[in-house]
Amino acid sequence: MQALQKLIADFHASDPWLGLLLLALCLAVAWLLAKRLGRGQSQGAASVWFGRHTADGLMFPLLALLLVYAARTGVALYRPAFVLQIAVPVLVSLVVVRLCARVLLSVFPQSPASRLIERFVWWGAWLGAALWVTGLLTPMLAQLEAVSLHFGKTRVDLRTLLEGGLSAGLVLVLTLWVSAAFERRILASSFTDLSLRKAAANVARAVLLLVGLLFVLSTVGVDLTALSVFGGAIGVGLGFGLQKLASNYISGYVMLLERSLHIGDNIRIDSFEGRITDIKTRYTLVRATNGRESIVPNETFITQRVENLSAADLKFRLFTEITVGYDSDVELVRRILAQAAAAQDRVIASPEPVAHLLQFAPDGLMFALNYWIADPAAGQDSVRSAVNLAALAALREAGIELPFPQRVVRMVDTPAN
């Protein structure tokens, strides 16, 4: 109540019109400075400082906060600055909201969880601003400090836990921002290989996150020497129950560093075939030609046989088996099949399509038509269907028989008993 009474007294003792004028002036100057600094910068969804426009980036509220704080300090020397005093916590909350929102949108542009976190930060920041303005933040923190939890000889209060959680969240956001900027500005120009750049980005992000969390733990008063016992427990857990998980993580880094597989390679593992779309630290995303995406543990690529179709040759072979009648002209059939495949746009000219007499089947002569494409990621069924339709039409036009399975059933009379 004393804080509210002081706030009301400051309102009566201050000049609200002067405060509004100074606030408008600070906002205008901040907008002009942010616009000038953002001139020539890439303003888009990935811009944390300037956003899509000048007003929705981080630079504008940060400059406005500095100017308003300076104005409030100067006015407070002569009289209470009610409007500027309220504007400072509001701008602090706006800076926090913009920082989290722009960083999450830049790092995870398509993630629904980032939207949920952004709303949570929005409500938390404005609630903190309201408590700060009304003067209820200090007594609330005192009440949280009075509530404590005991873990053996260690005493932890709710205020410490709250401040530690907020500090950890802020460090996580800053780590994501620094690692994204590091990957975009430095790694993109230093590493032309996408897989190696991915490995360097993962290592840099993990190191920055570890350093930030250690800094947060030391800030809230956690004894870091106790982490040695915790680290030993994690080592035992990895050695027994988490060995598969650890193996996948280590295999992921081995794949990225050895560059045996790259993002964009077409691979065949067991009976599954597809294109690598992303290599994570624990698993790899492989998209099949039918559009379905599979999550393959990284250990599989280390311990099993994997065919890298892109590493050997960018040409991808397809084939079709066709059976014709025994009285057909073999050379004519081979020429018709090869021409039917060569007439398709996606079938490449070198090596040229070729048809071979595969075997003497029970129902006719079986030919194998081989042809190659250069873009298997665009789908295989469509080009295979086009080749089959063209071959079928050409064979029918040439009068070549396409036999169907025939079976002869012989009835044997048995003598009556």
Image (cartoon, rainbow, N blue to C red):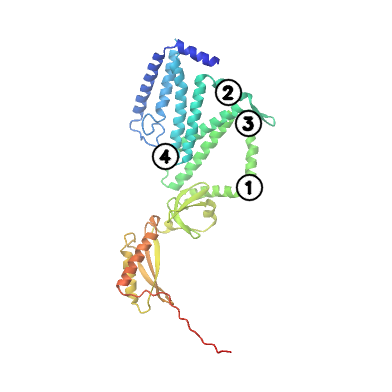
Secondary structure, mark 1, is helix
- Residue drawn at the location 54% of the way across and 22% of the way down: 137
Circle 1 is placed at which residue position? 239
Q: Alpha-carbon distance for marks 3 and 2?
A: 23 Å
Q: Is residue 136 above or below residue 55?
A: above
Circle 3 is placed at which residue position? 223
Would residue 159 be found to the left or right of residue 94 on screen? right
Labels 3, 2: front one: 2
Q: Where is residue 338 in the image (x, y as percent from the top left)?
A: 33, 68
Name which residue type carries label 1: Gly
Circle 4 is placed at which residue position? 184
Secondary structure, mark 4, is helix
Is the N terminus in the top left, top right, bottom left or bottom right quadrant? top right
Residue 141: which disc? Answer: 2
Which of the two discs, 2 and 1, labels the residue nearer the N terminus? 2
Count neighbours of disc 1 (C-alpha within 10 A) and say few if under 14, some if 14 to 19, many if 20 or more.
Answer: few
Q: Alpha-carbon distance for marks 4 and 1?
A: 36 Å
Q: Position of residue 258 (x, y in %)?
A: 49, 50
Q: Alpha-carbon distance for marks 2 and 4?
A: 40 Å
Residue 21 in sight in this render: yes
